[in-house]
Amino acid sequence: MKDYRVLVVDDEDYMRAAVIETLQRADFPAMTASSAKEAMDLMAHRKFSVVITDVKMPGMDGLKFFQKVKELHPETAVIIMTGYPDLQDAINTLKQGAVDYLQKPFMPQKLTDLVAQFIDYQRDDAVDQLDNLITQDAYMQQILNKVRTVAASNAPVLIQGETGTGKELIAQALHDSSQRSETGKMVAINCAAIPESLLESEMFGAERGAYTGANARHLGKFERAHKGTLFLDEISALSWHLQAKLLRALQEREIERVGGNGSIPVDVRIVASSNEDIEEFVEEGKFRPDLYYRLDVIRIALPPLRQRKCDIPLLADHFLKMYARLYNPRIIGFSDGALKALEAYDWPGNVRQLQNVVQQATIEIDGTYIGTDSLQLNRRNRVKIIEEETLDAIPFKVGMSLHEIEKQAILRTLDAHGGNQTKTAEILRITTRTIRNKLHEYSSQVNALNS
């Protein structure tokens, strides 16, 4: 029996004929079905790598058919075709596990390029990059399976989770497990760590002479990520102006450098992350809803470490072995008390904090086992010390208002940590949203004085 690997489902005869001809010219063995029922009958006797289905069909529509396929054949990739300008149905389906969508009319090359990702690129034969992510938690395993499923898609991904939960690791795994790892690289930019005055040129590039000090053309992250993946970390920190420019880049698939006149085509997959609730930002008018819907096609929500306690011993042992090789080969492991202390702690800094605690203990210990006394887990005391050191550096003056003291604390802590709002919020024990609001307040005050 011939190995038919692509199934095209559409009730319109001309559309089926056009798609099948395009696929056959590209040497992709394919079959067609005029309804979801006919497709289900074919799938009962044949195995397909890819199913391409229209949305609007009589009887069982394409979305219900998709859900049936994922239920009975979860290993099969599903591509949604739609001839309607409102893509919300397709986007909702992508969130449930479809790999991509095609909006009619589409170019034949786009169809074949998309199918090639799932026919030519054999993810099962490649090194599974997700093996590097250590977990035995059932929910995390579901997330990793979802990453494997959606990696080959070009659809945007929004990763949400607290600081230190591994958002960048997931973004890298998405890239490494995709065909884009062969054509480009993953380029990351932390939107909260770069001053707004520089962020635009970092993202989109700048022409020579665009601003003071621009002595040569500067390529931005979009151009550096061409044919690869662009990871926008802490996307909620973007200003309204940059949100609008990012939205245009996603819609038009082109960018314009600062100080430039021409448009530059870019082919990037966007993976964004945030430790904030972006939906709440949208409701408060701080984040553009049209950009949010563009980014939130595939959602991956990472749990905090305190909700995956079973992973703490695994991760701690992994970090111990890693740092023991570097600093102290005599270390064998943790004492029973130390392991219990690690598991009982709530880890406000998540996996990143666990890694830091194990690293510090490995460097400082003189014996062969890490005991409870070697674990610096009292985060509140550590933060208090850092706060006191920061506040000691502030030039307090008699008559200084509480507002001015607060302003000095925020600005000096930001300056000490290179403008990193997330780190500043952690040290001062306030939210990044509070910092953004305060910076906006300080900026407004300056503008009022100058006007």
Image (cartoon, rainbow, N blue to C red):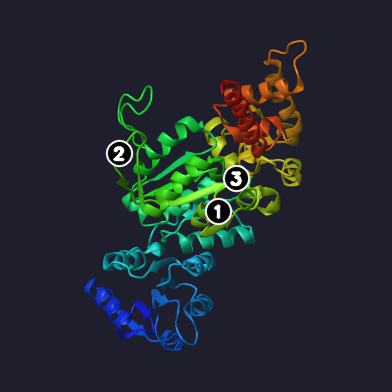
Query: Residue 421 at what x, y percent from top left?
Result: 60, 33
- Which image quarter is the N terminus in? bottom left
- 150 or 258: nearer the eye? 258
Q: Amino acid at mark 1?
A: Pro
Question: Separation of disc 3 and disc 2 at Cα?
Answer: 29 Å
At horizontal 33% and vertical 70% (from top left) the residue drawn is: 105
Q: Earlier in the sequence, mark 3 or mark 2?
A: 2
At horizontal 53% and vertical 67% (from top left) the residue drawn is: 92
Neighbours of disc 2 within 10 Å: few (<14), some (14-19), many (20+): few
- 449 or 285: nearer the eye? 449
Neighbours of disc 3 within 10 Å: few (<14), some (14-19), many (20+): some
Q: Amino acid at mark 3?
A: Lys
Query: Residue 383 at what x, y percent from top left?
Result: 71, 29
For disc 3, the marked residue is: 286
Q: Earlier in the sequence, mark 2 or mark 1?
A: 2
Provide the secondary structure element on which disc 3 rests. loop
At horizontal 70% and vertical 41% (from top left) the residue drawn is: 348
Q: Amino acid at mark 2?
A: Asn
Instruction: Kindly indicate whether the residue at mark 2 contacts the one at mark 3 (C-beta within 8 angstroms).
Output: no
Provide the secondary structure element on which disc 2 rests. loop
Query: Residue 69 at what x, y percent from top left?
Result: 49, 78
Q: For residue 289, which numbered disc appears in the image?
A: 1
Above or below, 268 relative to 357: below
Instruction: Kindly indicate whether the residue at mark 1 contacts the one at mark 2 (C-beta within 8 angstroms).
Output: no
Q: For residue 146, which numbered disc appears in the image?
A: none
For disc 2, the marked residue is: 261
